[in-house]
Structure formats: structure tokens, C-alpha cells
Amino acid sequence: MIHQLSYLQAIVIGLVQGLTELFPISSLGHTVLIPSWLGGSWAALVSEESRPESPYLAFIVGLHLATALVLIAYYWREWLRLIRGLITSLITRRIQTPDQRLAWLIVIATIPVGVAGLALEHTFRVLFARPEAAALFLMVNGGILVLGERYRRRAGQAAAPGAGAMAAAAGQAGPTVPAGMAGAGLADPVATAPGSPASAGPTEPGALSTAPPTSAEPARTEPARTEPARTEPARTGSAATAGPGGSAATGSATSSTSGDNSKTRAIAPGASAGLPPSDNGTRPGPGGPAAPPLPPAPAPQAAAGHTPIDGASEQRLADLGWRSALWIGAAQILALFAGISREGVTMAGGLVRGLSHEDAMRFSFLLSTPVILAAGALKIPDLTGPLGAGIRGQVIVGSVAAAATSLFAIVFLSRYFRTRTLTPFAIYCLAAGLISLIRFI
């Protein structure tokens, strides 16, 4: 029984464990270092962890269940698809879809750490659950993150010259597209090539054109445009008030509508002011060029149907390859040392294998879920047996705290790694590990 574990300690340790389990900074290392720094009854908890039969160790691993359940709840759609893909591949004996491939990659990647965890987890925790060892391995964790970032940066720099040459070759070929047209999504060389619909203009009177109007159109100077027929009520509608400067535009509009006044007003909204209509039906400023067509609005994304792992990301992960998945999964074995982060080494391995930071984070979360869930499930007999006597209430309270910070960590990191890197976490691990090592040696 852990007489020193109070509810306050359970809440604090639960908050720390939930946050640091998913941040690439090692939860086990922090559950060793923070109580050691606080001293007193907190430090006594660490000495409990290094015992062969440790209630505190059972409490810590029991908190992993809360983190695993949060991961499953957050990625529940993905896990349903993966489980369904795994089952269907077993039934059909074929691996065809991205769901099936990704499911088997997770199985392959989990095998090394599963075998090593069953054989070495308890021994490693008993031997290395000490503040000086945790501080040293925390520095090692920082070094792994630095190496992962450096490798990815060098790989990107090596690919940059080839990409630049391709871009230069593409810039020499094909016509130059005006900036306004490129912004409207019309930068396709085919659409702007001579003889194409975009360059040839309208093929029939009154048809809308995507090309800016010329300064002088021969059709506007034709004598037929000044015929009195333009002043007929059925032909002109609201355009009858146009001045001489607008007569050409009015004639152009009415000649293309065959007497339909409402359609005339829709095509030439600026006719009454003597201004030529723009290509997209909007009125430009006096003497200015026609405004380019607006690009189509992007498809709205429903917040309620948000998918943490979209189809494109799942396809990229499914194309990772079984060798890369096995290599990344084997890196999780290092997390058996207190101070080395499972998420950190998995993300670093993903970066080395060519994943982006966001995809590496997603893959690490998917790989961590079965491992964390299994580790917590193996400690359930300890918590329900004699080792859990007197701390079951603390386990529940600590699990709630761990679940809250785990959810925060998932949401925060999902946004953070869209644009940022592992470097700040590496600096923290190196600095915190060095300071702690000096303190406890």
C-alpha cells in the first residue's frame, strides 16, 4: 500500500502523465523527475517505483488506460475503418484499400515493441526508474529529436535543387499568364494557348468572354448600332436612359437577347452609365480593365464531421511500406527507458522515413494506442489485487486528470505540427535533462 499517495498527488501526477505521454518529452521520465524535484513524500513515491512489486508503478501504468481511451475516442472513426479493413482483408485474403494497408502496417509496427515490452518492461522500469537515469535518458531523447529534425532538413535541401530545376524548366515553357488570371485559377497553359476558347473569345454574339475587353471593338462602331430600333421599349428596357456613350453597350446587349429585357439587364448591368460590361458580369471602374472571374469557393468543411485523419493523410500513411513501419515501430522499444518518449522516437522515425510532422504525429498516435492500452490492461490485475489496496480512489481521480490533459495534448499537437517542428521539445529535453542530471548526481 502507498501510504504517501494523497488525492492531491494523484491529481498532479495524473495531469503530468496525461500531458507528457503524448508530448514528445517522456511521461515516465517526468513522473520520476518531478516527484524527485519536489522531495519529501513526493520523492518517496519514486523509491516505491523502483521496487519489484510497486503499487506506485501500477498506479502510473493504470493512468495509461485513460490516455489510451482518449486516443480511441478522438480517432474512433479511423479505428472503425482500420478494424473493418483488417477484418475484411482476413476474410478476402487480400490487402487492397488504404484502410487495409494501414491496419496491417500498425500490426507489423506493434510486434517489436510488444515482444520487447513483455520481456523487458518490468526489468527496465525497476532498474532505470531513478532520477539520475531519467535525466540522462531525457537528454538522449532530446538528441533523438534533434537528429530527426536535422535528417529531415538535409533531405529537403537535397531535393530542393532538383525541384528548382524543374520549376525553371516549367517557367521557360508555355505562355506567361497574367497575375490576375492566375489568381482566378486560369493559369492552365492549355486554356491560354492561341486558338483555345479562352483566347479566341466568344464564338457567338453576346456570349460571355474570359478575356479582358479591348480598348476599341469594331462592332461598337458599326452604323447598325445607331439604328432607332434601339430605342424601342421592348428592346431597351431600363437601358433606354443610356446616353450616347452607352448606346454601343446597349446595342450589344440587346442584340444578344432577342428582346428579353431581364436577360439584357443581367448581362450588361453598367450599360446605363455608358460603361462596357466586364467578362464576369460586374461593372469595372471608369477606364479600368475588366475584373477577372472569381475563383470557385472551396468546398465547406463541416465542423461536426471533422476527421482527424483525412483521406489524403491516410493514403500517405498507407503507402509508407512495411519496412518503414517495422523500423518506426521498433524505435518504440527505446521508450522502455524512463526519459525517452514513445511519441518522440516514433515521430523522429517518421521524419527519417519521409513523413511530414503532421503525418508523423498521426502515425505515432495510432501506433501508441494499442501499446498504451495493452500496458494499462496488463496492470489491471495489480490494481484489483493487493497492490491496489488503498489507492483505487486515487487511480480514478488521477485517471480523470490524465484524460483531461491527454485530450488537450491531442488537440494542441494536431494544430501545432501543421506548421512547426520538434525543435522546441528537443531544446527542453536537453536543458531539463542536463539540469536534473547535475541536481541528482
Image: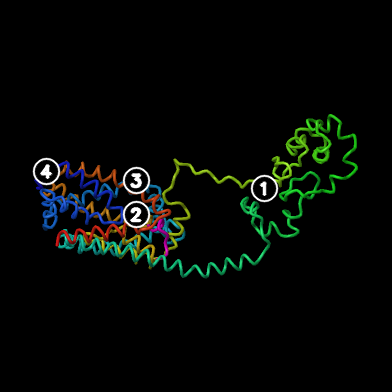
Characterize the local packing of mark 3: few (<14), some (14-19) or many (20 or more) Cα atoms within 10 angstroms.
few
Q: Residue 398 location in percent, x, y?
A: 21, 44
Kind of residue indicated by mark 3: Ala
What kind of element bears circle 1?
loop
Camera-near label (1 vs 4) is 1
Q: Which mark is residue 73?
A: 3
Hey, which residue is sitting farthest front in the picture?
287
- Name which of mark 4 and mark 3 comes first in the sequence: 3
How far apart marks 4 and 3 lie (CA) works out to 29 Å
- Name which of mark 4 and mark 2 comes first in the sequence: 2
- Asked whether 110 or 172 is in front, the reply is 172
Q: Residue 135 location in percent, x, y?
A: 20, 60
What kind of element bears circle 4?
loop
Q: Which residue is mark 1?
A: 292
Q: Residue 305 location in percent, x, y?
A: 45, 43
Characterize the local packing of mark 2: few (<14), some (14-19) or many (20 or more) Cα atoms within 10 angstroms.
many
Q: Which mark is residue 390?
A: 4
- Name which of mark 1 and mark 3 comes first in the sequence: 3
Q: Which mark is residue 199?
A: none
Q: Are marks 1 and 3 in contact (CB under 8 Å)?
A: no
How far apart marks 1 and 3 lie (CA) works out to 46 Å
- The span shown in magenta is 353-360
Scheme of colours in the image: rainbow
- Name which of mark 1 and mark 2 comes first in the sequence: 1
How far apart marks 4 and 2 lie (CA) works out to 33 Å
Kind of residue indicated by mark 4: Gly
Q: Are marks 2 and 3 in contact (CB under 8 Å)?
A: no
Q: Which residue is mark 2?
A: 365
- Quarter of the image holding residue 303? top left
Q: How many marks?
A: 4
* Left or right of 354 on screen, residue 375: left
Residue 103 is one of the magenta-drawn residues? no
